[in-house]
Amino acid sequence: MARQRVLVPYNFTIHDQKAIDFIIRTFLAVKEIKFTLFHAYAPLPEIQTGSNAVLGRLQGTMMSLSEELRGQERYLKEGREALLKKGFSDDQVDYIFKAREKDVANEIAETALKGGYQMILLNRNPTKITRLFGRSVSGKLLATLRNTTICIVN
């Protein structure tokens, strides 16, 4: 039997833990399943500072942002480790940490299609402000993907 593949977008919020807890409660006994924690980050531009003092300060800021990205990847690995500690096997849990080339919804959709994921497990950030500025990631994924289960943990 083919292993079901589940893509789990990870946003480094308190709501991510709800998704991890849901995975543990719901799928721990299921051996024919594979989870991939996924995060696509905005890439940092390369800056040539030369001898310009303003650009030198900007380089310091960029170094700080680079360290923040490394920290996010560590958190993603920690999410993977949390699943392993609860009993999932090493070949059941993976992660993808990549530079974003498109908007988040399109990155998720493209990864799901290319990777053959049958399910996307989203967590919901219950704020009203996002509804004012356009469709949510989940709404875009529902409109874009076919033959893919989208599970929203609230």
Image (cartoon, rainbow, N blue to C red):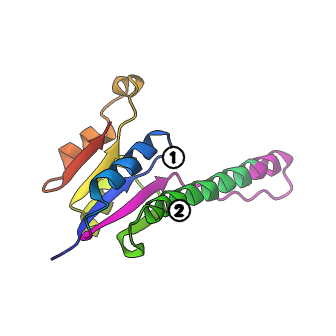
The answer to whether residue 53 is seen in the rendering is yes
Q: Residue at x 49, y 57 (%)?
A: 79
Position of 27 relative to 11 (above/below)? below
Q: Do residues under tags 1 and 2 come within 8 Å of each other at their CB atoms?
A: no
The answer to whether residue 103 is seen in the rendering is no
Looking at the rendering, the stretch of residues picked out in magenta corresponds to 31-60
Residue located beneath label 1 in the image: 12
Residue 71 in the image: state x and y as whole percent.
63, 55
Mark 1: which amino acid?
A: Phe
On the image, which quarter does residue 44 sit in? bottom right
Report the Cα–Cα distance between label 1 and label 2.
11 Å
Q: Quadrant of the N terminus?
A: bottom left
On the image, which quarter does residue 66 sit in? bottom right
Callout 1 secondary element: loop
Of 40 and 45, nearer the camera is 40
In the drawing, what numbered circle is on residue 80? Answer: none
Q: Residue at x 36, y 23 (%)?
A: 132
Of 4 and 106, nearer the camera is 4
Mark 2: which amino acid?
A: Lys
Residue located beneath label 2 in the image: 77
